[in-house]
Amino acid sequence: MEIGKRIRNLRLSKDLSVNGLAKKAYISQSYLSDIENGRTAPSLDKLTLICDALDISLSEFFGDVPELPAEIIKLIESARKLTDEEIMLLSKFLEAISERKSGV
C-alpha cells in the first residue's frame, strides 16, 4: 500500500483540499503534498494527526481493505449518515437497478 496514495484517496472521498486536510491535521500544506506525492513518508505522529483529521483510526487506515474508487468511498460515507429506514429504501433501490441491468 502506498501511504500517500491512500491519504489522497481518503482526502478526496471527504471532499477535502490539500490545504483543508493540512489545516485539520495541523501540518503544512507542502508537507502533506510531499506525502501524497511519495516524496516523503509521514512519521507515526503525523500519520495519526492525518487519520484523526480524516475521522479514521490507524487500524482502518492500514486495514487489509482493497482500494476503492473515491466515488464508492463517498457513497459509503453518505450511507453512514442514513437512518435504518433510509438504508432499507436505498437497498431496495439498488436491488431494483441491479435487476434491471441484469434483465431479471
Image (cartoon, helix red, strand yellow):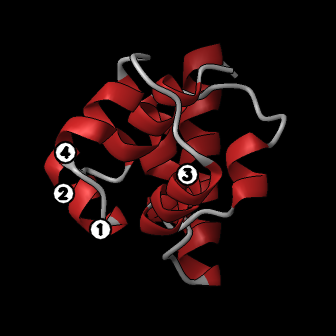
Q: Is residue 93 visible?
A: yes
Q: Tell me where residue 57 sits by quadrant.
A: bottom right
Location of residue 64 in the rendering, given as x and y in whole percent from the top left corner: 84, 34
Q: Give the distance between the C-alpha atoms of the residues marked 3 and 4, in whole angstroms.
A: 14 Å
Height in image: 76 above or below 25? above
Residue appearing at x 26%, y 55% in the figure: 22
Q: Which residue is mark 1?
A: 24
Location of residue 101 in the rendering, given as x and y in whole percent from the top left corner: 56, 18
Q: Tell me where residue 21 sits by quadrant.
A: bottom left
The image quadrant where one finds the C terminus is top right
Q: Earlier in the sequence, mark 3 or mark 4?
A: 4
Q: Which residue is mark 3?
A: 47
Q: Amino acid at mark 4?
A: Gln
Image-based side of 46 in relation to 87, left or right: left
Report crowding for label 1: few under 14, some 14 to 19, many 20 or more residues within 10 A (C-alpha): some
The image quadrant where one finds the N terminus is top right
Residue appearing at x 52%, y 30% in the figure: 41
Q: Which residue is mark 2?
A: 20
Q: Give the distance between the C-alpha atoms of the residues marked 1 and 2, in whole angstroms.
A: 6 Å
**Of 58 and 101, which appears nearest the observer?**
58
Q: Earlier in the sequence, mark 3 or mark 2?
A: 2
Q: Amino acid at mark 3?
A: Leu
Q: Which residue is mark 4?
A: 29
Q: Give the distance between the C-alpha atoms of the residues marked 4 and 2, in whole angstroms.
A: 8 Å
- State if disc 2 and disc 1 touch (CB < 8 Å): yes
In what element is the residue under mark 4? Answer: helix
Q: Earlier in the sequence, mark 3 or mark 1?
A: 1
